Amino acid sequence: MKLHQLRYLAAVVQNGLNITTAARKLHTSQPGVSKQLKLLEDELGFPLFERDGRSLTSVTAAGQQVVDRALRILEEVQNIRRLSSDLKDDRSGSLAIGTTHTQARYVLPPIVQRFRAGYADVDLHLHQGTTEQIAELAKLDRIDFAIATGGAELFPGLVLLPCYRWQRRVVVPRNHPLARERTLTLEALARHPIVTYTFSFSGRSSLPALFESAGLKLRVALTASDADVIKTYVRLGLGVGILASMALHPDEDADLAVLDAEHLFAPHVTWIGFRRGRLLRGYMYEFMKLFAPHLSRRLVDQAIRAGSGAELERLFEGIELPQL
């Protein structure tokens, strides 16, 4: 059994059992990958995949156990490389972050600026997407950190650390009828079409659920993953915008009326997550502390050891999260 065989096995599984795609990602040939997988199966004495002709259709039960162990082995190999790099030079390397447009556009710029000032030799890569897309990147081990809000069930292999709280805000053109409302209500919102963030595909989204529980119908004019797009269509009169508080700028959005909605919507918590068992390099700890000052190296290490969700919650019980 060779390390590159385990790497080929992991790549094939992570690319939907498509050997051609896996070979392309590995910068090798499709026949070469097929041959190594067959050699691995011959050595193990059982098939790793169900096949239909030359196509792989599924991973066998025994094969899944091998895949799970292979992924852990490959993670440890990567940890050894990180340890070597850390001991030789902790001020260079790379950091890949998967996050939403709102985080990348409105929250991360000053953090990235300060991080780059201290770690100019660290290559930083930002991947923007929905929570589901970020989860897929994490599953494929394409990112070091995931930054998102909610959707914890999509990230079962990650340690998720709470960073800050934020509220939804309602935005309308200044001549809109809602701008004259003294106290905003769900009933008033339900009378207008809504422009807001793309709803989750994997579970019940909180906004439709809120209207449903109040016996009201949520009229959706448009959903988008980009806060700037939401504001653009609000300006065009397409509907009432509901978006994150940090996506609003007093100067850039001076033409919009921003309505308080804290009494209508529960606060959200944004978290940063990384794969459990991953060796974190010094500059990774520093990035987390810049993003959320309460995430000291000691607290992060305690969170890694905490294990279950309940233990992790207890660890953060006495910490007042910042509100953006």
Image (cartoon, rainbow, N blue to C red):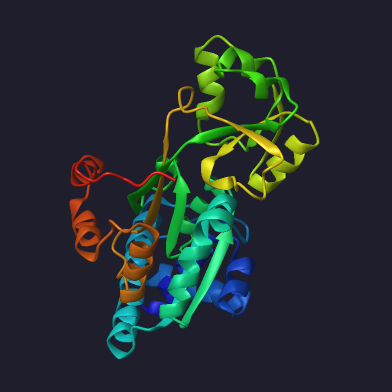
Using the image, determine if residue 237 lies above or below residue 143: above
At a point 27% along the width and 44% down the height, the residue shown is: 320
List x then y, in percent, for residue 295. Answer: 28, 58
Q: Is residue 217 visible?
A: no
List x then y, in percent, for residue 182. Answer: 57, 18
- Of residue 1 and residue 68, the one placed in the foreground of this image is 68
- Of residue 48 and residue 285, the one placed in the foreground of this image is 285
At a point 67% along the width and 45% down the height, the residue shown is: 253
List x then y, in percent, for residue 265. Answer: 48, 26
Residue 188: image quadrant is top right
Using the image, determine if residue 292 lies above or below residue 151: below
Residue 207: image quadrant is top right
**Left or right: 69 in relation to 260:** left
- Of residue 192 and residue 59, the one placed in the foreground of this image is 192
Using the image, determine if residue 79 lies above or below residue 150: below
- Of residue 110 and residue 156, the one placed in the foreground of this image is 110
Quadrant including the N terminus: bottom left
Using the image, determine if residue 143 lies above or below residue 222: below
List x then y, in percent, for residue 104. Answer: 56, 58
View extreme (bottom): residue: 88
**Left or right: 60 in relation to 221:** left
**Left or right: 191 in relation to 102:** right
Residue 46: image quadrant is bottom left
Q: Is residue 123 visible?
A: yes
